């Protein structure tokens, strides 16, 4: 049940037909794990907290640096050298005391991924490297946990939702991340943010879209991004959507799966 304070705080949600009281209660009882408290995770966490998501887990092993502050708006100058999970938790507490924050000051790995993911209803991945992105998507598939995943380049961003443990309206399995991108690009072929640069406000756009998609997944309205990749061009502010489907040759849920655990990551 929502308290009187929560009814006032979330009034603009509650008057929405698509959300209402039941939807706001669903947000209150939801448990969401956010991977990364950086450029994407910062706005994502703020908007999920403002929306009233009851429990937010944050996985990040980094500390706040001065170069982060150009885009990672959940952190501030006094937070320099502070663990990002602590800085983010403090900002969320200031914004909404009704939200419980579970900080995980560690890197998500093959050894802890399934345990971490198993504690939550949904995962939102805003990590900044391919190895983590593939690990999280594979782990969520194995754990049968919905995943909202996004990425940003210099002036491009992508966003999709994965529910490969479920079937679509056509009766076929929903696609995995590997149905869309079978393998990560070779190391060194995609420059890191520190080398190529990034427009700070653009990470806010994609992180905010992640929050919209997470809220839609929890409340259950609209046409979600399962089987659809949203692509955003930051130079022209053009939005396009690419449809993709289950690949019977994908190594996770295909006809002859070869990935049944995370041992390959542990070996690497």
Image (cartoon, helix red, strand yellow):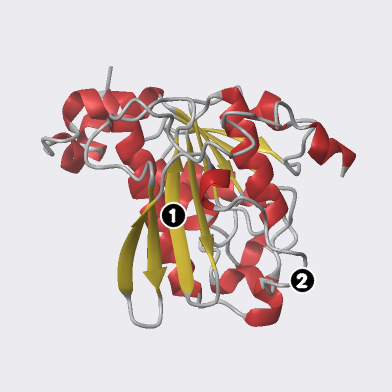
Q: What label does residue 75 carry, if any? A: none
Task: Point out residue 90 in the picture as x, y percentages from the top left corner.
Answer: 56, 46
Instruction: Identify the secondary structure beneath mark 2.
Output: loop
Q: In the figure, is residue 13 to the left or right of 127?
A: left
Label 2 environment density (alpha carbons within 10 Å; few <14, some 14–19, many ≥20)? few
* Of the pair 171 and 108, the residue shown nearer to us: 171
Q: Is residue 197 above or below residue 74?
A: below
Residue at 28%, 29% in the rendered image: 169
* Of the pair 160 and 105, the residue shown nearer to us: 160
Q: CA distance from mark 2 to mark 1?
A: 23 Å
Disc 1 target residue = 159
Disc 2 target residue = 188
Residue at 44%, 71% in the rendered image: 202
Looking at the rendering, which quadrant does residue 154 occupy? bottom right
Q: Is residue 226 above or below residue 66?
A: above
Q: Are marks 2 and 1 in contact (CB under 8 Å)?
A: no
Task: Point out residue 24 in the picture as x, y percentages from the top left corner.
Answer: 26, 29
Observer able to see residue 6: yes
Task: Point out residue 184 in the picture as x, y percentages from the top left corner.
Answer: 67, 56
Q: In the figure, is residue 149 to the left or right of 37?
A: left
Observer able to see residue 4: no
Looking at the rendering, which quadrant does residue 234 occupy? bottom left
Residue at 89%, 39% in the rendered image: 267
Q: Is residue 68 above or below residue 61?
A: below
Mark 2 or 1: the one toward you: 2
* Of the pair 248 and 150, the residue shown nearer to us: 248
Label 1 environment density (alpha carbons within 10 Å; few <14, some 14–19, many ≥20)? many
């Amino acid at each position: 049940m929502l308290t009187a304070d929560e009814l006032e705080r979330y009034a603009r949600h509650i008057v929405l037909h698509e959300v209402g009281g039941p939807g706001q209660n669903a947000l209150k009882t939801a448990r969401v794990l956010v991977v990364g408290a950086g450029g994407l995770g910062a706005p994502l966490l703020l908007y999920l907290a403002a929306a009233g998501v009851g429990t937010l887990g944050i996985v990040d092993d980094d500390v706040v640096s001065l170069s982060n502050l150009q885009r990672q708006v959940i952190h501030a100058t006094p937070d320099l050298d502070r663990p990002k999970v602590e800085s983010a938790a403090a900002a969320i507490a200031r914004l909404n005391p009704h939200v419980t924050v579970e900080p995980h000051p560690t890197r998500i790995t093959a050894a802890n991924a399934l345990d971490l993911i198993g504690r939550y209803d949904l995962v939102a991945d805003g990590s900044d490297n391919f190895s983590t992105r593939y690990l999280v998507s594979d782990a969520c598939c194995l754990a049968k946990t919905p995943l909202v995943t996004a990425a940003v380049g210099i002036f491009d961003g992508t966003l999709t939702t994965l529910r490969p443990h479920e079937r679509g309206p056509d009766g076929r399995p929903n696609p995995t991340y590997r149905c869309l991108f079978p393998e990560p690009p070779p190391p060194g072929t995609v420059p890191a943010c520190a080398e190529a640069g990034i427009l700070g406000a653009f990470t806010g756009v994609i992180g905010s879209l992640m929050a919209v998609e997470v809220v839609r997944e929890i409340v259950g309205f609209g046409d979600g991004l399962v089987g659809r990749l949203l692509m955003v061009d930051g130079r022209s502010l053009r939005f396009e959507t690419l449809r993709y489907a289950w690949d019977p040759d994908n190594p996770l849920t295909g006809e002859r799966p070869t990935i049944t655990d995370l041992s390959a990551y542990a070996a690497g």
